[in-house]
Image (cartoon, grey):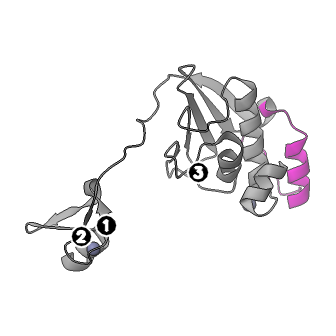
Amino acid sequence: MKKATMFHGHICPGVAIGALAAKYALEHGYEHSPDEELVAVVETDNCSVDALQALLGTTYGKGNLIHKDYGKNNYNFYSRKNQKGIRLSLKKSLLNDKKLSRDEKIQKLLNMEPESAFDIREIEYDPPGMAQIEESVPCSICGELTMESRMMNYQGQLMCIPCYKEFKQ
Ligand SMILES: [Zn+2]
Ligand SMILES: [Zn+2]
């Protein structure tokens, strides 16, 4: 929790949820990932994800943290080493409890077993592909180096997405 809070910048219920999910993963053969051994596919972009980055090594920069913008506290983990996957889905009763203060929520979460905070089930081993290293080429308009796969073709000119948007107006 300390490590996650340091990384995140403050202590909050979100970090406690992420720490709890990470704890479960670590205790069930989903080891901290110096490279891309572990992949997290998360369906939220809230505070909890920072705990996963800090504790599991599933980070945005390495490409083993995938965000699906569904607005749900669901966390899917895939272990490339063990070829298995699990899904943790936060039980709804927790965060919406209006009787609890923020601090009480944090305390409650920290004293909880992951099994009572989440619905947990094994999922098919079907992780997203490994991160790709790709050539960058200069945009024909602004000149900034841009990954080739993100270039847009506008009337035969290759340009970056922001330049393309401006052109299209
Ligand atoms: Zn937070
Ligand atoms: Zn450009």
Residue 91 appears in which quarter of the rendering?
A: top right
Label 2 sits on what residue type? Cys
Residue 136 appears in which quarter of the rendering?
A: bottom left
> Could you say which disc has been placed on residue 145 in the image?
1
Percent coordinates x, y for residue 93 in the rendering: 77, 44
On screen, residue 52 versus residue 144, left or right, reads right
Q: What segment carries the magenta color?
A: 91-114
Determine crowd level at label 2: few under 14, some 14-19, many 20+ residues with C-alpha closer than 10 A: many
Dot 1: element: strand
Percent coordinates x, y for residue 24 in the rendering: 74, 31
Kindly identify which residue carries mark 2.
139
Determine crowd level at label 3: few under 14, some 14-19, many 20+ residues with C-alpha closer than 10 A: some
Q: Which of marks 3 and 2 is nearer the N terminus?
A: 3
Percent coordinates x, y for residue 11 in the rendering: 82, 59
* Label 2 lies in ligand 2 vicinity (Cβ under 8 Å): yes
Residue at point 80%, 58% (across, down) = 12
Residue at point 72%, 43% (across, down) = 55
Residue at point 83%, 57% (across, down) = 98
Quadrant that contains the C terminus:
bottom left
In this picture, is 113 found above or below 134? above
Q: Distance between the residues labelled 3 and 1?
A: 30 Å
Dot 2: element: loop
Q: Nearer the viewer, residue 44 or 28?
A: 28
> Could you say which disc has been placed on residue 105 in the image?
none
